[in-house]
Image: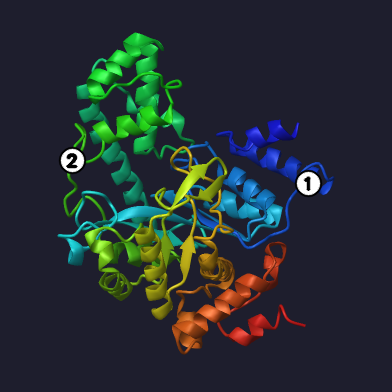
Amino acid sequence: MVEELEQRLDSFDRNERNKALSVLCDRAKAGEVVFYEPGLAVNLHCHTFFSYNCYGYSPSKIAYLARKAGLAVAGIVDFDVLDGLDEFLEAGGMLGLKTCAGLETRVFVPEFADKVINSPGEPGIAYHIGLGFPSARLHGAQAKFSAGLRKTSRQRNIGLMKRVNDYLNPVQLDYEKDVLCLTPAGNATERHLCIAYARKAKALFGQGSELAGFWSEKLGVEVSGFKGPEDVVLLNTIRAKTMKLGGVGYVQPDRGAFPELEKMNEFILAAGGIPAVAWLDGTSEGEKDIERLLEVAMARGAAAISVVPDPGYTACVPYRRQAAPGLSGKKLENLRGVLEVAEKLHLPVVAGTEMNSPGQSFVDDFDSQELSPFLPVFLEGAYIVYAHSVLQRAAGLGYTSGWSRDNFEDAGEKNEFFREVGSLLEAQNEEVLSDLDENVRPRQIIKRFVN
C-alpha cells in the first residue's frame, strides 16, 4: 500500500498527488512510514517533472523523499517555470520539511561575450538561478517576463525539433502529440525530445536489429544492446549527436537568444527571489576568472552562488552520490577556491544534485572525505535561503528586500541573521512569523525562537 501511494505521488493529476501525500503523512504518524529526524544534508537544486526529472518525480514526491531521508532543507529549481512552487511549499508544510523553490534558465553576460562560462561551446551564455521565490503568482511586468521565458523555451524546442525531424526522417515528432504528453504543464525540455524520438523510433522499427541499425546510421556510432527506448546511453547519444554543439539540430545562440543577466536579475528581485550565479567546475575560461564573473554578476544584483553538481566529482549510484576514489585534484581545488571567494564576498552558497540525468543521486554524499569539509557552508546557505523564503512570503522581509538593506550594516551581519532564523525556525511553526511587518527589528524576530 505504501509503495502504491508513493508511485501515485508522481501522477500528472494534482488531486491524486495531494490525496496520496495526505495518506502517506497519516501512515507516518501510524509508524508505517519512517521519517528520519532532520540531519545536516541538503539539496537545493532538485528538478521536478515540471521541467525534467529523470525519475519522474513531482514536487510532492521530492518533498516526501527529502523528509523521509531527513534532509535539513530541500529546494526545487525548474527550468524557466515556477509551476511546482506552490505544491512543493504546501507539501513541505504537511511533512514538516524546510523548503524553498526557484527556477533556472540561461542568460547572456555581455562582459563575457567572448568567453565560455558554463554552457559548453556557447560564449557569453551562462546558466543562472533564482532562489527562494515566495510565490508563483506573479503580476504585471513579472508575469509578462515569466511568460516570455516559457514562450521562448517552447519556440526554441520546436525549432530544434523541426531540424532534427528533417534529419531523422521517417522518425518525426509532433510537438503537441509526442512531446507535451510527457510533461504535466506543457514545459518540455531537450531531454523530453530525446525520449520522444527514442519511443517513436521503437514504434516504427521495433526493438531488434532494424532499430539498432537506424540509430547507428543516424548517430554515426555503433548502437546495440541498449535496454529499451529510454536507455541512458541511447538518450545521451541522441542528445549529443543531434541537439548539442556539432549536432544536426544545433544552432549557435546569438545575443538575443536568452535574456541578459541584468534583466533576469531585475525579474528575480522584483518577484521576491535571490539571484544566484550557477557555478559548474571552474575549468572553463569564464569560470577561471571567477572573481571577475562574480563582480559583474553582483553589480547586477546577484546575491548568492549555486554549486551545480558535476559527475566528475563523484561516481553516481541510485539515490546516493558516492565520492569517487582518486577524485580529480584540480576540480576539488577549484571547488575549494570558489568557496573561498564566496566567503570573502559574503555570498551564501547552495548546493544540490539536479536529478535531470539518469544516475544522478537524490543527495550528495556529505560524509565523504571530499565533500564533508564543505557541508557547513552548504548548510548555512540552505538555512539562509529557507529563512528568506519564509520571511519574504510572510511580510516581504526577505534577504534581498528593502527591509534587509535598512536593518543590516553589512552582508556578514545579514547572513548571520538569516542563518539563525533558518536554523531555529521549525517548518511546522512558520505561522509564528505571519504577523510581522516592516517595522519589526531583527532581534525581535530572533526572540520569538529563544526563551
For the point 53% across and 75% down, which residue is it? 397
- Residue 406 location, x and y as percent? 47, 86
- Residue 284 location, x and y as percent? 26, 58
The residue identified by callout 1 is: 28
- Residue 138 location, x and y as percent? 44, 57
Q: Earlier in the sequence, mark 2 or mark 1?
A: 1
Question: In the visual, does 235 lie left or right of 46?
Answer: left
| Image quadrant where residue 308 sits | bottom left
* Foreground pick, 309 / 75: 309
| Image quadrant where residue 116 sits | bottom left
- Which quarter of the rendering shows the C terminus? bottom right
Looking at the picture, does residue 310 appear above or below residue 179? below
As drawn, which residue projects farthest toward the front?
Answer: 326
The residue identified by callout 2 is: 251
For the point 55% across and 57% down, which residue is it? 368
At mark 2, the secondary structure is loop
At mark 1, the secondary structure is helix
For the point 63% across and 51% down, which residue is it? 66
Disc 1: CA contacts within 10 A as few (<14), some (14-19) or many (>=20): some
- Which quarter of the rendering shows the N terminus? top right
- Residue 17 location, x and y as percent? 63, 39
As drawn, which residue projects farthest toward the bottom?
Answer: 409
> What is the tally of numbered marks visible in this picture?
2
Q: Are dots 2 and 1 in contact, CB under 8 Å? A: no
For the point 27% across and 30% down, which residue is it? 161
Question: In the visual, does 221 lie left or right of 394?
Answer: left
**Mark 2 belongs to which amino acid?**
Val
Inter-mark Cα distance, 2 to 1 = 50 Å
Disc marking residue 236 = none
| Image quadrant where residue 24 sits | top right
Looking at the picture, does residue 375 appear above or below residue 363? below
**Mark 1 belongs to which amino acid?**
Ala
